[in-house]
Image (cartoon, rainbow, N blue to C red):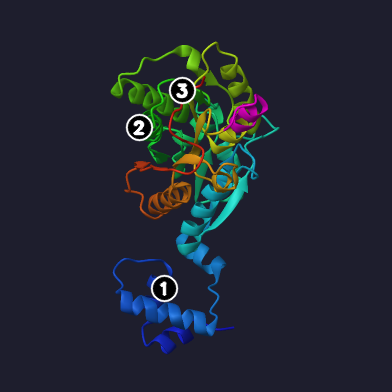
Amino acid sequence: MVSIHEVAKHAGVSVATVSKVMNNYSDISSKTRNKVNKAIELLNYQPNVVARSLVKKRSWTVGMFLLDYFTNPFIAELIDGLRKSLEDSGYDLLFLSPNLRNPDYTFTKHCLSRNVDGVVMFGVDRNNQNLLDLLQAEMPTMMIDTDLLGPRTGYVTADNSQGAYLAVQHLVELGHKRIAFISGDLGCLVGQTRFTGYQQGLRSSNLPYYAKYVEVEDYSIEGGYKAMKRLLQLPEAPSGVICSSDYMATGAIEAIRESGKQVPEHISVVGFDNTFYAELSMPKLTTVNQNIASMGIRAGEHLIRMIENPDYSPPTEVVPVDLVVRDSTGVYMEQQ
């Protein structure tokens, strides 16, 4: 088995330098870092993870509590970004079940029993007592799309308000005035901020807000379908609809088709996420691009800094969004 001394000799550097490169120290030049990494790759050097753990008192493992399905394309892209940032720094990702049958077995105990260095949370109720206890336990933690802060807890979210605002502005520019909003849970950060952006978009265009044009459902295809069916029953149905996820938009489009109307000829539809569903949709979906993978990457990078530097302040980061215009939105045409 190749040793660290052989890597150092091949790269023409000291053992200490090889160790610094492997542990991502910032005081190593790019030229030296590249030499060491090439030597590691050429010699197929496998660092002794157990030894590293004993020296640094780390497991080089990050846990993730996840309350959603892996089949959700948003989750898949989020995990992809998170895993990439962790792997680049030598960490593994371990999925932890938040559904603990033993009431005495808390999130904190779960993390300690798995010996994780830090944890990422997504989709866990902000009022969950297990979560609140974990935040107070000072375990390095990054929340995604939940604005909770603790002594060692920060969060990353997309600029959801701006995303909904851009969606409204896009429909207004196409001549739409009756713009509906299919929302997720209004009690959470994502739901609140997207709803706020929707209202701001209407106000900035001098359009009235009508509660009848707002429907709340879960973020599923079925949720979008059911909400759209209700909107279609209104005496004056909307000509444009903003959905809080691409999944919801897919369901909404199906409901519109079933009613005998077409997208975008009769009703324009905007999604939110820009997952691969947006490209596969018929028609291709205009949607708010959340830069999902970037959210995962940034959560991982912040978490690693908290793990490796006890003085690193828990961050709050809002990732910029943009609107991707495709075929599901069109110029408003007065219906006869």
Q: Name the outermost residue toward the top.
A: 235
| Of residues 53 and 266, the one drawn nearer to the viewer in this rendering | 266
Q: Specify the principal SS of the magenta part.
A: helix
Instruction: Answer with the quarter of the image where residue 198 lies.
Output: top left
> Which numbered tag is attached to residue 334?
3
Callout 3: helix, strand or loop?
loop
Disc 1 target residue: 19
How busy is the neighbourhood of tag 3: few (under 14 within 10 Å), some, or many (20 plus)? few
**Which amino acid type corresponds to the residue marked 2 in the rendered image?**
Glu
Query: In the image, which residues are magenta?
Result: 252-262
Q: Is residue 99 visible?
A: yes
Q: Which mark is residue 243?
A: none
**Residue that appears at 49% across and 17% down:** 213
Examine the rendered structure and indicate whether residue 166 appears above or below residue 50: above
Q: Amino acid at mark 3?
A: Glu
Percent of width and height locating residue 145? 46, 36
Disc 2 to disc 1, C-alpha distance: 57 Å
Numbered disc in front, either 2 or 1: 2
- Which mark is in front, 2 or 3? 3
Q: Are marks 1 and 3 in contact (CB under 8 Å)?
A: no
**14 left or right of 62 in image:** left
